[in-house]
Image (spheres, grey):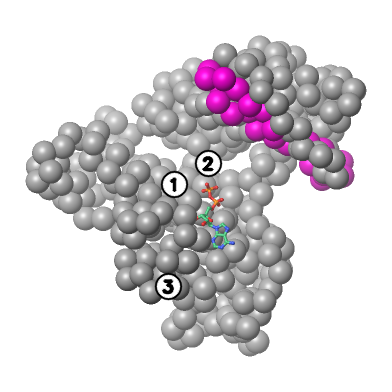
Amino acid sequence: MKILVVNAGSSSLKYQLFDMDTNEVLAKGLCERIGIDGIVTHKRPGKDDYKSNVDFPNHKAAIECVLALLTDKEKGVIGSVDEIAAVGHRFAHGGEKLKKSSILGDQELEYLESIVGLNPLHGPPAISGLKACKEVMPSINHVGVFDTSYYSEMKEEAYIYPIPYELYEKHKIRRYGFHGTSHRYVAAKAAEMLGKADAKIITCHLGNGSSITATVNGKAVDTSMGFTPQDGVPMGTRSGAIDPTVVTFIQKAEGISADEADKLLNKESGLLGVSGISSDCRDICDAAEKGNHRAQLALKILVHNIKKIVGSYIAEMNGVDAIVFTAGIGENDRQIREDVCKNMAWLGIEIDEAFNKSCPRGETVDISAKGAKVKTFVIPTNEEYMIALDTLNLTK
Ligand code: ADP
């Protein structure tokens, strides 16, 4: 069965076509600059990439271009669009109602449209991508997979903020959590490696956006991102958790509006804000190695905050069986992994530092020290596969 996975952003649309019988990616690619001028990049394993300028006035034109490429005699991988059994759509937010991956009918679409206020950046383009795909492929299932749904079984005390309860009732202000599809995928892999379904696992998704999630028995019990992806550990350009009063203080002290303060905390803070160099961890590591104090400080703040969250989740779960590192920084930055795991031996977390430095990239590896009570794994994430799998399961 072939499943198409679509991730629509405001001016982009990413796609991957899976053959779920062989678990292979047949083709994947990206339509960029939708509504501007348009570029498509189409990749197939073992073949040259195809890149071309195509005018996409909207998401519908972009998905039509994708389907034309997938079925093209030379560049294609399938004979006809009819071979696509279903489409899985990535949604950042499923609100409080879409608690699990779901087939998206009129009711679900109406609900998604009603919650765009919670998700103003990702919601509208994802809905527009869904509508375009439904229009072009009306006779098959369109499944929504939501980053938030992994957190739908957290206890109230983990998601209700200690602010007037009426604000939760009125505006649905609560911790939702994000990156759930990634955490679900790597936590399941870790449980499989441990051979323990009821394992206690802490997954550190450290990329441009970063979040940490605690999972017990396959269910998320807490997570560092909150009402928005702004909460938790410092990120490329996001501050992560800070004293909330800093926001109103900055507004008054700098004479800036709420929107400007929001931009400052979302786009100008985190690794970029502290280092003044870049939001990219590689640039900061290079500068830190050359002795740049603010680059060194940015990395120390990152590690300090990851440790604090990991420690708090161990307390919350009364122990941990495995720590998992994933995403751009988690999968590649050996120094950050070593620094996070340093001085955690009392908790049972110890890594094999030499193997951590030399282990292969892009593979699932166990970097725990011999005899360590807690396992430490590096597991490459694969959100698209998870979306395809949920879509398959709802379609079969
Ligand atoms: P996104 O959240 O955009 O999906 P990624 O998961 O791709 O982000 O992670 C991007 C981050 O990963 C960047 O900070 C980048 O510097 C970091 N990264 C990628 N490769 C490496 C590497 N080889 N060493 C250190 N950091 C890396």
The part of the chain drawn in magenta is 20-41
Answer with the quadrant where ligand 1 appears in the image.
Answer: bottom right
Name which of mark 3 and mark 1 comes first in the sequence: 1
Please say if 294 is above or below 4. Answer: below
**SS category of the residue bearing label 2:** loop
User: In the picture shown, does residue 78 fall above or below 173?
Assistant: above
Q: Is residue 240 left or right of residue 68?
A: left
> Which label's residue is closer to the chain start, 2 or 3?
2
Is there a contact, CB below 8 Å, between mark 2 and mark 3? no
Q: Is residue 137 magenta?
A: no
Q: Nearer the viewer's eye, disc 2 or disc 3? A: 3
Q: Position of residue 62 (x, y in %)?
A: 64, 20
Which mark is drawn over residue 130?
A: none
In the rendered image, which quarter is residue 144 located in? top right
Left-right relation of 171 to 4: left
Give the crowd class for mark 1: few <14, some 14-19, many >=20 residues within 10 Å: many
Numbered mark located on residue 147 in the image: 2
Tell me whether circle 2 and circle 1 mark residues in contact (CB < 8 Å): yes
First in sequence: mark 2 vs mark 1:
2
Quarter of image, res 380: bottom right
Is residue 29 visible in this depiction of the protein? yes
Element type where label 1 sits in the image: loop
**At 68% from the left edge and 65% from the top edge, which residue is drawn?**
361
Left or right: residue 270 versus residue 74 is left
Nearer-the-camera pick, 268 or 210 = 268
Residue under the point 53% across and 47% down: 180
Residue tagged 1: 177
Q: Position of residue 157 (x, y in %)?
A: 34, 53
Question: Who's the residue at 85% across and 22% down the image?
Answer: 72
Which residue, given by chain and number where applicable, does mark 3 sit on?
290
